[in-house]
Image: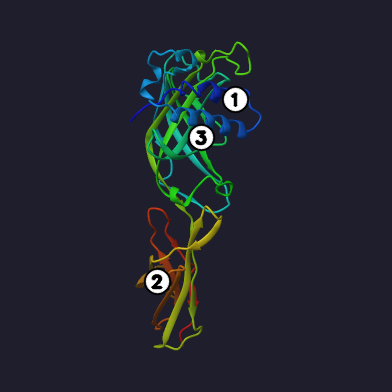
Amino acid sequence: MNIRATVAAVSGALALASFAVPPAQADDAASYRASVAEIREAAHGASSHRAAFSASADAEDMPYALNATFSNVKLGAAIKVGTTKHVAVPVSYTLTHGAEVDITAADFFTGPYIYKGSYDAPVNELIGDDPATCTVKTSTTATCKGSIDIYPADGELLNSDAGAWKAGALAMAFNGQDPLSPDFDMTQVGYADQGGLASTRVQRYSRLTVNAAPEPVRKGKTLTATGKLTRANWETNTYKGYTKQAVELQFRKAGTSTYKTVKTVYSDSSGNVKATTTATYDGYWRLRFEGSSTTPAVSATGDYVDVR
């Protein structure tokens, strides 16, 4: 894995200037999110992250490489995101740092993030509303807990963002520096950033309905189950049909607890699903979608049909 531990020389000053005060002293979550977004954007804008710490005429404008790394990152294997509801994803990790780094300082902060695409050129990144909280374990290690906060209604995701993402973590130490002070010295600010720490999937939340008819039905007659498979469209904040997907018709006999697949059909160009079968026993009929890399599995609530 690569470690990106600086801000681009040209844009770094602007990025850090966006901190009205260090995040640990900020009044609200928006300050942390905006500040980290600025510094992450600046870091990704560097022409060469590995070369950022090499001697250059602009070295005086750079924060130094903070002696901190991250490991043992844990988060859910899949993150299901709908069209409007805020999603908070818990993340835990281990922070390892040099003895000279004071992680208990009021102006030290760390937090997790996830990104789509490559570490050096992500197409999207998501962070938390607040910095992580850390518990000191030894003089050089701590366990930290934070979150990734996702707001689909705010346009944070495109439909193309669904699928594989990776996790990273960052840390920043202001070391008493005040970005608003005329004496602010960026070279006294430490920054560490590490990607490729874990993998997850960000998925478009799915819905599936079913209606089995007729109700009741005579034994041996045809029973038809209809429904619709939809998933979140993050660009319109609505649910749209998920087309040409395999959907299982399942049955649970009255008095039992297990559904069994009767047949597999496919959703049409609008996400509609239709399956026919022969009615034999009283019980519950449902439709089941097994999911894909971009869309989670979902089952319709069983519809009871009385067979006479």
> Foreground: 254 or 265?
265
Instruction: Give the SS element for disc 1.
Output: loop
Question: Residue type at mark 3?
Answer: Gly
Q: In which quarter of the image is the N terminus?
A: top left
Q: Is residue 57 left or right of residue 15?
A: left
Question: Residue type at mark 2?
Answer: Gln
Where does residue 173 sit, x and y in percent of width and height?
Answer: 51, 19
The crowd level at tag 3 (other Cα within 10 Å; few <14, some 14-19, many 20+) is many
Q: Choose top left, top right, bottom left or bottom right for residue 107.
A: top right
Q: Which mark is residue 19?
A: 1
Real-space Cα separation, disc 3 to disc 1, in angstroms: 20 Å
Where does residue 165 sit, x and y in percent of width and height?
Answer: 40, 43
Instruction: Give the SS element for disc 2.
Output: strand
- Can residue 6 be seen in the rendering of this structure? yes
Q: Choose top left, top right, bottom left or bottom right for residue 199.
A: top left
Q: Residue 250 carries which label?
A: 2
Q: Earlier in the sequence, mark 3 or mark 1?
A: 1
The crowd level at tag 2 (other Cα within 10 Å; few <14, some 14-19, many 20+) is many
Real-space Cα separation, disc 2 to disc 1, in angstroms: 55 Å
Instruction: Give the SS element for disc 3.
Output: strand
Q: Residue 146 carries which label?
A: 3
Q: Choose top left, top right, bottom left or bottom right for residue 271.
A: bottom left
The crowd level at tag 1 (other Cα within 10 Å; few <14, some 14-19, many 20+) is many
Q: Earlier in the sequence, mark 2 or mark 1?
A: 1
> In percent of the image, x 44 and y 72: which residue is there?
273
Q: Which of marks 2 and 1 is in front?
A: 1
